[in-house]
Image (spheres, rainbow, N blue to C red):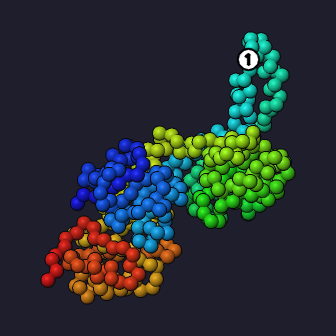
Amino acid sequence: MIHRIRTLNAISPSGLNRFPHDFEVGPDVADPEALLVRSANLHGLEIPGSVLAVARAGAGTNNIPIPAMSERGVPVFNTPGANANAVKELVIGGLLTAARSLVAGAAYSRSLAGSDAEIEAAVEKGKKQFVGFELPGRTMGVIGLGAIGVLVANAAVALGMRVIGYDPKVTVERAWQLSASVEHAASLDEVFKRADVVTTHVPLLDGTRGLVSYERLALRKRPRILLNFARGPIVDEAGVLRALDEGLLRAYVCDFPSAALNAHPKVLAFPHLGASTNEAEENCAVMAVESLSAFLLDGTIVNSVNFPAASLPRAEGTTRLAIANSNVPNMVGQMSTLLADRGHNIADLLNKSRGEIAYTLIDIEGEVSSDLLDHIRAIEGVLSARLINGHTAPTN
Protein backbone atom coordinates (compact mmCIF):
# COMPACT_ATOMS: atom_id res chain seq x y z
CA MET A 1 0.00 0.00 0.00
CA ILE A 2 1.29 3.45 -0.93
CA HIS A 3 0.84 6.14 1.73
CA ARG A 4 0.42 9.69 0.49
CA ILE A 5 1.92 12.69 2.34
CA ARG A 6 1.37 16.28 1.24
CA THR A 7 3.98 18.83 2.34
CA LEU A 8 2.83 22.42 2.76
CA ASN A 9 6.29 23.87 3.45
CA ALA A 10 9.86 23.07 2.50
CA ILE A 11 10.86 20.20 4.81
CA SER A 12 14.46 19.15 5.42
CA PRO A 13 15.48 16.27 3.12
CA SER A 14 17.11 14.64 6.15
CA GLY A 15 13.61 14.11 7.48
CA LEU A 16 11.83 13.29 4.23
CA ASN A 17 14.39 10.60 3.49
CA ARG A 18 13.19 8.77 6.63
CA PHE A 19 9.86 7.92 5.00
CA PRO A 20 9.73 4.31 3.73
CA HIS A 21 10.27 3.92 -0.01
CA ASP A 22 6.59 3.18 -0.69
CA PHE A 23 5.46 6.59 0.59
CA GLU A 24 4.48 9.24 -1.95
CA VAL A 25 5.60 12.63 -0.61
CA GLY A 26 5.40 16.14 -2.04
CA PRO A 27 3.48 19.43 -2.26
CA ASP A 28 1.15 18.25 -5.03
CA VAL A 29 0.16 14.82 -3.69
CA ALA A 30 -3.53 14.18 -4.32
CA ASP A 31 -5.90 12.76 -1.69
CA PRO A 32 -3.23 12.86 1.05
CA GLU A 33 -3.47 10.66 4.11
CA ALA A 34 -1.35 13.13 6.07
CA LEU A 35 -0.22 16.75 5.97
CA LEU A 36 3.32 17.74 6.96
CA VAL A 37 3.83 21.43 7.72
CA ARG A 38 6.10 23.94 9.37
CA SER A 39 4.62 27.45 9.33
CA ALA A 40 1.74 26.96 6.87
CA ASN A 41 -1.50 28.29 8.34
CA LEU A 42 -4.21 25.62 8.14
CA HIS A 43 -6.92 27.75 9.73
CA GLY A 44 -9.57 28.42 7.13
CA LEU A 45 -7.94 25.96 4.72
CA GLU A 46 -10.13 23.12 3.45
CA ILE A 47 -8.43 19.98 4.74
CA PRO A 48 -9.29 16.97 2.55
CA GLY A 49 -11.45 14.23 4.03
CA SER A 50 -8.71 11.75 3.15
CA VAL A 51 -6.41 13.22 5.81
CA LEU A 52 -5.81 10.86 8.73
CA ALA A 53 -3.09 12.86 10.52
CA VAL A 54 -1.35 16.24 10.59
CA ALA A 55 2.25 16.75 11.71
CA ARG A 56 4.14 19.96 12.34
CA ALA A 57 7.92 20.00 12.12
CA GLY A 58 8.15 22.24 15.18
CA ALA A 59 6.79 22.55 18.70
CA GLY A 60 4.04 25.16 18.40
CA THR A 61 0.76 24.11 16.77
CA ASN A 62 -1.23 27.35 16.82
CA ASN A 63 -1.25 27.26 12.98
CA ILE A 64 -3.33 24.06 13.04
CA PRO A 65 -7.09 23.88 13.84
CA ILE A 66 -6.70 21.28 16.56
CA PRO A 67 -10.33 21.23 17.82
CA ALA A 68 -11.58 20.63 14.28
CA MET A 69 -9.07 17.83 13.78
CA SER A 70 -10.07 16.24 17.09
CA GLU A 71 -13.72 16.25 16.04
CA ARG A 72 -12.70 14.30 12.93
CA GLY A 73 -10.61 11.83 14.89
CA VAL A 74 -7.38 13.16 13.35
CA PRO A 75 -4.27 13.24 15.56
CA VAL A 76 -1.99 16.28 15.37
CA PHE A 77 1.70 15.63 15.95
CA ASN A 78 4.47 18.05 16.87
CA THR A 79 8.18 17.75 17.65
CA PRO A 80 8.78 18.76 21.28
CA GLY A 81 12.44 19.16 22.12
CA ALA A 82 13.72 18.82 18.56
CA ASN A 83 14.68 22.49 18.43
CA ALA A 84 15.38 22.84 22.15
CA ASN A 85 19.14 23.33 21.90
CA ALA A 86 18.77 25.91 19.14
CA VAL A 87 16.33 27.97 21.20
CA LYS A 88 18.44 27.58 24.35
CA GLU A 89 21.48 28.99 22.58
CA LEU A 90 19.49 31.96 21.29
CA VAL A 91 18.07 32.65 24.77
CA ILE A 92 21.53 32.66 26.33
CA GLY A 93 22.82 34.79 23.46
CA GLY A 94 19.98 37.26 24.00
CA LEU A 95 20.70 37.36 27.72
CA LEU A 96 24.39 38.10 27.24
CA THR A 97 23.60 40.68 24.57
CA ALA A 98 21.20 42.54 26.85
CA ALA A 99 23.33 42.24 29.98
CA ARG A 100 26.33 43.78 28.21
CA SER A 101 24.50 46.15 25.79
CA LEU A 102 26.32 44.49 22.90
CA VAL A 103 24.03 45.55 20.05
CA ALA A 104 23.87 49.18 21.14
CA GLY A 105 27.61 49.21 21.75
CA ALA A 106 28.35 47.74 18.34
CA ALA A 107 26.00 50.25 16.69
CA TYR A 108 27.79 53.08 18.49
CA SER A 109 31.19 51.86 17.31
CA ARG A 110 29.96 51.54 13.73
CA SER A 111 28.68 55.11 13.82
CA LEU A 112 32.11 56.55 14.64
CA ALA A 113 34.08 58.26 11.89
CA GLY A 114 37.44 59.93 11.57
CA SER A 115 40.98 58.76 12.09
CA ASP A 116 41.91 55.80 14.25
CA ALA A 117 43.03 58.20 16.97
CA GLU A 118 39.72 60.07 16.85
CA ILE A 119 37.72 56.84 16.96
CA GLU A 120 39.77 55.60 19.93
CA ALA A 121 39.10 58.83 21.78
CA ALA A 122 35.39 58.59 21.05
CA VAL A 123 35.33 54.98 22.24
CA GLU A 124 36.90 55.90 25.56
CA LYS A 125 34.48 58.76 26.00
CA GLY A 126 31.34 56.89 24.99
CA LYS A 127 31.75 53.42 26.44
CA LYS A 128 30.38 54.39 29.86
CA GLN A 129 26.87 54.49 28.45
CA PHE A 130 27.10 50.78 27.70
CA VAL A 131 28.14 49.52 31.13
CA GLY A 132 26.54 46.13 31.77
CA PHE A 133 26.48 43.54 34.51
CA GLU A 134 27.87 40.04 35.00
CA LEU A 135 25.69 36.97 35.42
CA PRO A 136 27.14 35.06 38.42
CA GLY A 137 25.00 35.67 41.49
CA ARG A 138 22.08 37.09 39.52
CA THR A 139 18.72 35.30 39.65
CA MET A 140 17.01 33.94 36.55
CA GLY A 141 13.34 32.98 36.63
CA VAL A 142 12.35 30.31 34.12
CA ILE A 143 8.62 30.06 33.39
CA GLY A 144 7.92 26.66 31.87
CA LEU A 145 10.17 23.67 32.46
CA GLY A 146 9.68 21.66 29.30
CA ALA A 147 12.48 20.60 26.98
CA ILE A 148 13.66 24.17 26.29
CA GLY A 149 13.07 25.57 29.77
CA VAL A 150 15.13 22.80 31.38
CA LEU A 151 18.05 23.40 29.01
CA VAL A 152 17.92 27.15 29.65
CA ALA A 153 17.76 26.66 33.42
CA ASN A 154 20.71 24.27 33.41
CA ALA A 155 22.74 26.60 31.17
CA ALA A 156 22.07 29.51 33.52
CA VAL A 157 23.24 27.41 36.47
CA ALA A 158 26.44 26.64 34.54
CA LEU A 159 26.95 30.39 34.08
CA GLY A 160 26.85 30.88 37.85
CA MET A 161 23.32 32.22 38.12
CA ARG A 162 20.76 31.39 40.78
CA VAL A 163 17.76 29.85 39.03
CA ILE A 164 14.14 29.59 40.11
CA GLY A 165 11.69 27.69 37.94
CA TYR A 166 7.92 27.67 37.74
CA ASP A 167 5.90 24.92 36.10
CA PRO A 168 3.02 23.29 37.98
CA LYS A 169 2.82 20.58 35.29
CA VAL A 170 6.48 19.65 35.00
CA THR A 171 6.86 16.01 34.00
CA VAL A 172 8.89 13.44 35.89
CA GLU A 173 11.22 13.13 32.90
CA ARG A 174 11.98 16.86 32.84
CA ALA A 175 12.33 16.98 36.62
CA TRP A 176 15.06 14.33 36.41
CA GLN A 177 16.85 16.37 33.74
CA LEU A 178 16.73 19.59 35.75
CA SER A 179 19.80 20.63 37.73
CA ALA A 180 19.44 20.03 41.45
CA SER A 181 20.45 23.67 41.95
CA VAL A 182 17.22 24.95 40.41
CA GLU A 183 14.76 26.14 43.03
CA HIS A 184 11.06 25.63 42.41
CA ALA A 185 8.90 28.73 42.76
CA ALA A 186 5.47 28.35 44.33
CA SER A 187 3.82 30.91 42.03
CA LEU A 188 4.36 33.18 39.05
CA ASP A 189 4.34 36.20 41.32
CA GLU A 190 7.28 34.74 43.25
CA VAL A 191 9.26 34.52 40.02
CA PHE A 192 8.55 38.14 39.13
CA LYS A 193 9.35 39.37 42.64
CA ARG A 194 12.75 37.65 42.85
CA ALA A 195 14.24 37.36 39.37
CA ASP A 196 16.74 39.71 37.74
CA VAL A 197 16.05 37.93 34.46
CA VAL A 198 12.75 36.34 33.45
CA THR A 199 12.47 33.98 30.47
CA THR A 200 9.27 32.38 29.17
CA HIS A 201 9.00 28.85 27.75
CA VAL A 202 5.30 28.00 27.65
CA PRO A 203 2.91 27.32 24.76
CA LEU A 204 0.40 29.94 23.66
CA LEU A 205 -2.92 28.95 25.22
CA ASP A 206 -5.87 30.90 26.58
CA GLY A 207 -4.29 30.63 30.03
CA THR A 208 -0.87 31.92 28.94
CA ARG A 209 -1.93 34.80 26.70
CA GLY A 210 -0.78 38.02 28.37
CA LEU A 211 0.87 36.02 31.16
CA VAL A 212 3.67 38.62 31.41
CA SER A 213 1.75 41.75 32.34
CA TYR A 214 2.68 45.21 33.58
CA GLU A 215 1.31 44.31 37.00
CA ARG A 216 3.66 41.34 37.29
CA LEU A 217 6.62 43.30 35.98
CA ALA A 218 5.90 45.98 38.62
CA LEU A 219 6.26 43.45 41.46
CA ARG A 220 10.01 44.14 41.46
CA LYS A 221 11.22 47.73 41.38
CA ARG A 222 14.79 47.04 40.27
CA PRO A 223 15.30 46.90 36.47
CA ARG A 224 15.36 43.42 35.02
CA ILE A 225 15.73 41.74 31.62
CA LEU A 226 12.75 40.02 30.04
CA LEU A 227 13.34 37.28 27.45
CA ASN A 228 10.56 35.82 25.31
CA PHE A 229 11.40 33.17 22.74
CA ALA A 230 8.15 31.23 23.16
CA ARG A 231 5.28 33.13 21.50
CA GLY A 232 4.71 36.87 21.15
CA PRO A 233 1.24 37.14 22.76
CA ILE A 234 2.46 35.47 25.96
CA VAL A 235 3.76 38.94 26.76
CA ASP A 236 1.38 41.89 26.98
CA GLU A 237 3.14 44.26 24.59
CA ALA A 238 1.62 47.48 25.94
CA GLY A 239 2.52 46.47 29.50
CA VAL A 240 6.12 45.73 28.51
CA LEU A 241 6.51 49.08 26.75
CA ARG A 242 5.15 50.86 29.83
CA ALA A 243 7.56 48.92 32.07
CA LEU A 244 10.46 49.88 29.79
CA ASP A 245 9.47 53.55 29.89
CA GLU A 246 9.19 53.49 33.67
CA GLY A 247 12.56 51.77 34.15
CA LEU A 248 11.10 48.51 35.46
CA LEU A 249 12.81 46.74 32.59
CA ARG A 250 16.39 47.20 31.46
CA ALA A 251 15.63 45.42 28.17
CA TYR A 252 13.09 43.23 26.41
CA VAL A 253 14.63 40.62 24.12
CA CYS A 254 12.29 38.57 21.96
CA ASP A 255 11.85 36.72 18.68
CA PHE A 256 8.71 38.60 17.62
CA PRO A 257 9.22 42.10 16.17
CA SER A 258 6.33 44.53 15.76
CA ALA A 259 6.02 48.19 14.82
CA ALA A 260 5.71 49.29 18.45
CA LEU A 261 8.56 47.11 19.69
CA ASN A 262 10.89 48.10 16.86
CA ALA A 263 10.39 51.76 17.74
CA HIS A 264 11.61 51.33 21.32
CA PRO A 265 15.36 51.68 21.97
CA LYS A 266 15.34 49.13 24.82
CA VAL A 267 13.83 46.34 22.72
CA LEU A 268 15.93 43.81 20.85
CA ALA A 269 13.68 41.78 18.54
CA PHE A 270 15.03 39.00 16.35
CA PRO A 271 13.29 37.76 13.16
CA HIS A 272 11.96 34.52 14.64
CA LEU A 273 15.35 32.83 14.76
CA GLY A 274 14.57 30.38 17.59
CA ALA A 275 14.67 27.22 15.50
CA SER A 276 16.60 28.65 12.55
CA THR A 277 19.56 26.33 12.53
CA ASN A 278 20.25 23.53 10.11
CA GLU A 279 20.40 21.09 12.99
CA ALA A 280 17.05 22.12 14.46
CA GLU A 281 15.26 21.98 11.11
CA GLU A 282 16.65 18.50 10.49
CA ASN A 283 15.74 17.29 13.98
CA CYS A 284 12.18 18.60 13.66
CA ALA A 285 11.72 17.03 10.23
CA VAL A 286 13.06 13.66 11.36
CA MET A 287 10.81 13.56 14.45
CA ALA A 288 7.70 14.60 12.49
CA VAL A 289 8.35 12.01 9.77
CA GLU A 290 8.93 9.24 12.30
CA SER A 291 5.70 10.09 14.13
CA LEU A 292 3.67 10.07 10.89
CA SER A 293 5.26 6.83 9.67
CA ALA A 294 4.59 5.03 12.96
CA PHE A 295 0.98 6.18 12.92
CA LEU A 296 0.23 5.25 9.32
CA LEU A 297 2.03 1.90 9.44
CA ASP A 298 1.07 0.68 12.93
CA GLY A 299 -1.41 3.13 14.42
CA THR A 300 1.16 4.21 17.01
CA ILE A 301 0.63 7.61 18.64
CA VAL A 302 3.68 9.50 19.90
CA ASN A 303 4.17 13.25 20.33
CA SER A 304 0.54 14.12 19.66
CA VAL A 305 -0.95 17.30 21.10
CA ASN A 306 -4.55 16.08 21.05
CA PHE A 307 -4.41 12.26 21.26
CA PRO A 308 -3.11 9.99 24.03
CA ALA A 309 0.21 8.21 23.58
CA ALA A 310 -0.46 4.67 22.35
CA SER A 311 1.83 1.85 21.30
CA LEU A 312 0.95 -1.84 20.99
CA PRO A 313 3.35 -4.52 19.70
CA ARG A 314 1.89 -6.24 16.67
CA ALA A 315 0.49 -9.72 17.13
CA GLU A 316 1.69 -11.89 14.25
CA GLY A 317 -0.84 -12.73 11.57
CA THR A 318 -3.42 -10.20 12.70
CA THR A 319 -5.26 -7.25 11.23
CA ARG A 320 -5.15 -4.07 13.29
CA LEU A 321 -8.10 -1.80 13.94
CA ALA A 322 -7.22 1.79 14.88
CA ILE A 323 -10.22 3.64 16.27
CA ALA A 324 -10.64 7.17 17.62
CA ASN A 325 -13.77 7.90 19.59
CA SER A 326 -15.35 10.18 22.14
CA ASN A 327 -14.16 9.35 25.64
CA VAL A 328 -17.47 8.04 26.97
CA PRO A 329 -18.41 4.80 28.80
CA ASN A 330 -18.87 1.44 27.09
CA MET A 331 -17.15 2.28 23.80
CA VAL A 332 -14.68 -0.60 24.06
CA GLY A 333 -17.50 -2.88 25.18
CA GLN A 334 -19.55 -2.05 22.08
CA MET A 335 -16.55 -2.65 19.81
CA SER A 336 -15.73 -5.97 21.46
CA THR A 337 -19.34 -7.13 21.27
CA LEU A 338 -19.60 -6.20 17.61
CA LEU A 339 -16.41 -8.12 16.80
CA ALA A 340 -17.57 -11.16 18.75
CA ASP A 341 -20.98 -11.13 17.06
CA ARG A 342 -19.23 -11.16 13.68
CA GLY A 343 -17.00 -14.06 14.67
CA HIS A 344 -13.76 -12.12 15.09
CA ASN A 345 -11.35 -13.10 17.86
CA ILE A 346 -9.32 -10.36 19.56
CA ALA A 347 -5.63 -11.22 19.88
CA ASP A 348 -4.66 -8.01 21.71
CA LEU A 349 -6.20 -4.66 22.64
CA LEU A 350 -5.04 -1.28 23.91
CA ASN A 351 -7.29 1.59 24.97
CA LYS A 352 -5.99 5.02 26.00
CA SER A 353 -7.73 8.31 26.66
CA ARG A 354 -6.85 11.98 26.86
CA GLY A 355 -9.47 14.50 27.76
CA GLU A 356 -12.46 14.03 25.46
CA ILE A 357 -10.59 11.72 23.05
CA ALA A 358 -10.07 7.97 23.40
CA TYR A 359 -7.98 5.81 21.10
CA THR A 360 -8.16 2.05 20.71
CA LEU A 361 -5.92 -0.43 18.93
CA ILE A 362 -7.35 -3.92 18.39
CA ASP A 363 -5.49 -6.82 16.78
CA ILE A 364 -7.90 -9.29 15.20
CA GLU A 365 -7.05 -12.87 14.27
CA GLY A 366 -7.79 -14.26 10.80
CA GLU A 367 -9.53 -12.62 7.90
CA VAL A 368 -11.62 -9.52 8.43
CA SER A 369 -14.82 -8.86 6.51
CA SER A 370 -14.59 -5.93 4.13
CA ASP A 371 -17.62 -4.20 5.66
CA LEU A 372 -16.30 -4.31 9.24
CA LEU A 373 -15.26 -0.65 9.20
CA ASP A 374 -18.78 0.39 8.19
CA HIS A 375 -20.17 -1.33 11.29
CA ILE A 376 -17.46 0.13 13.57
CA ARG A 377 -18.04 3.63 12.23
CA ALA A 378 -21.77 3.24 12.80
CA ILE A 379 -21.22 3.05 16.58
CA GLU A 380 -22.28 6.37 18.07
CA GLY A 381 -19.21 8.25 19.31
CA VAL A 382 -16.70 6.74 16.86
CA LEU A 383 -14.81 9.58 15.17
CA SER A 384 -12.58 7.62 12.82
CA ALA A 385 -11.61 4.01 12.17
CA ARG A 386 -9.22 2.23 9.80
CA LEU A 387 -7.71 -1.19 9.17
CA ILE A 388 -3.93 -1.62 9.09
CA ASN A 389 -1.89 -4.39 7.45
CA GLY A 390 -4.41 -7.16 7.33
CA HIS A 391 -6.40 -9.52 5.14
CA THR A 392 -9.98 -8.82 4.25
CA ALA A 393 -12.51 -11.31 2.99
CA PRO A 394 -15.44 -10.38 0.73
CA THR A 395 -18.81 -9.90 2.37
CA ASN A 396 -21.33 -12.68 1.67
Q: Nearer the viewer, residue 236 or 334?
A: 236
The answer to whether one can see residue 168 in this image is: yes
Q: Is residue 172 above or below residue 271?
A: below
Q: Is residue 261 above or below residue 62?
A: above
User: Would residue 321 be found to the left or right of residue 283 on screen?
Assistant: left
Q: Is residue 205 above or below residue 178?
A: below
Image quarter of the C terminus: bottom left
User: Would residue 390 be found to the left or right of residue 48 on screen?
Assistant: left
Image quarter of the N terminus: bottom left
Q: Position of residue 73 (x, y in %)?
A: 41, 71
Residue at image coords 19%, 70%: 391
Q: Position of residue 173 (x, y in %)?
A: 55, 59
User: Would residue 215 be found to the left or right of residue 375 on screen?
Assistant: right
Residue at image coords 41%, 45%: 10
Local packing at callout 1 (Cα closer than 10 Å; few below 14, some 14-19, many 20+) is few
- Residue type indicated by callout 1: Ala
Q: Position of residue 176 (x, y in %)?
A: 58, 56
- Total marks drawn? 1
Q: Nearer the viewer, residue 27 or 74?
A: 27
Q: Quadrant of residue 239?
A: bottom right
SS for callout 1: loop
Q: Quadrant of residue 160?
A: top right
Q: For mark 1, what is the residue? A: 113
Q: Position of residue 69 (x, y in %)?
A: 44, 67
Residue at image coords 33%, 46%: 17
Residue at image coords 30%, 54%: 29
The answer to whether one can see residue 163 in this image is: no
